[in-house]
Image (cartoon, helix red, strand yellow):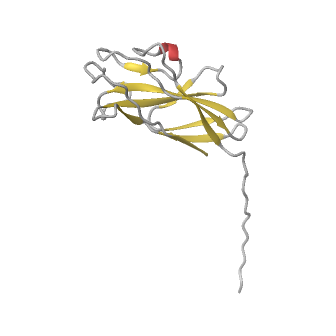
Amino acid sequence: AQVEATATASADIATALTLTKTADINFGTVPATTPGVVKLDPTDVTASTNVGSSRTLGEFTVTAAVSDVIDLTFDSQVTLTDGSSNNLYLLTEVAGAETTSDDFTSLSSNGTAQFTTSSTGDYVLRVGGELTQSNSATFGSAGNLSGVTVGSYSGTFNASIVYN
């Protein structure tokens, strides 16, 4: 005897996701003799410690479907090099808010996070973190930069988003 079954096929078509960088991460000028933790606080740049006056948080704008859940993946550690053989490491932390005028909430420092877009489909991500001399340091215990080789260090931070 023949037996039949049916299944419903469905798909939700959402607004195309965009992730746009609006500012780079910059700790400003930090003395090589800095004895404490160098931290750029993504929830409040004025709460940062041992950073230069020209510091800026990294910032990204997200455009997505209205009030939708988004999964974020990002580099939890970024290698910064002076162009020679000297490295520093940025242990990143990401914070988010629906608009730039809202209070920013820490989302994660472990490389993954999840957030919900606003009633307009927008969201703002800010990136900061801690500088360290050790590539095995953990966030919250980065140590200090005392004795680091003087130079201009840079590296690349990567982030991606996808609908949940």
Viewer-proximal residue among 123 and 50 = 50
Q: Residue at x 40, y 17 (%)?
A: 29
Is residue 138 shown to the viewer in this render? no
- Quadrant of the image containing the N terminus: bottom right
| Side of 152 relative to 57 (left or right) | left
Q: Position of residue 50 (x, y in %)?
A: 39, 14
Q: Residue furthest bottom?
A: 1
Residue displayed at 41% across by 20% down: 39
Depth check, front residue: 89 or 85: 85
Residue 162's place in the image compared with 11, above or below, is above
- Percent across and percent down for residue 40 are 45, 21
Relative vertical location of residue 58 with respect to residue 113 in this rendering, above or below? above
In the rendered image, is residue 134 in sight? yes
- Total labels: the figure holds 0
Residue drawn at (47%, 24%), measured in percent from left and top?
26
Residue 7 percent coordinates (x, y):
72, 67
- Is the residue 54 above or below the residue 72 in the image? above
Residue 67 at x, y percent in the picture? 70, 37
Relative side of 119 to 114, left or right: right
> Which of the pair 72/114 is nearer the observer?
72
In the rendered image of this protein, does residue 124 appear above or below residue 164? Answer: above
Q: Residue at x 67, y 35 (%)?
A: 117
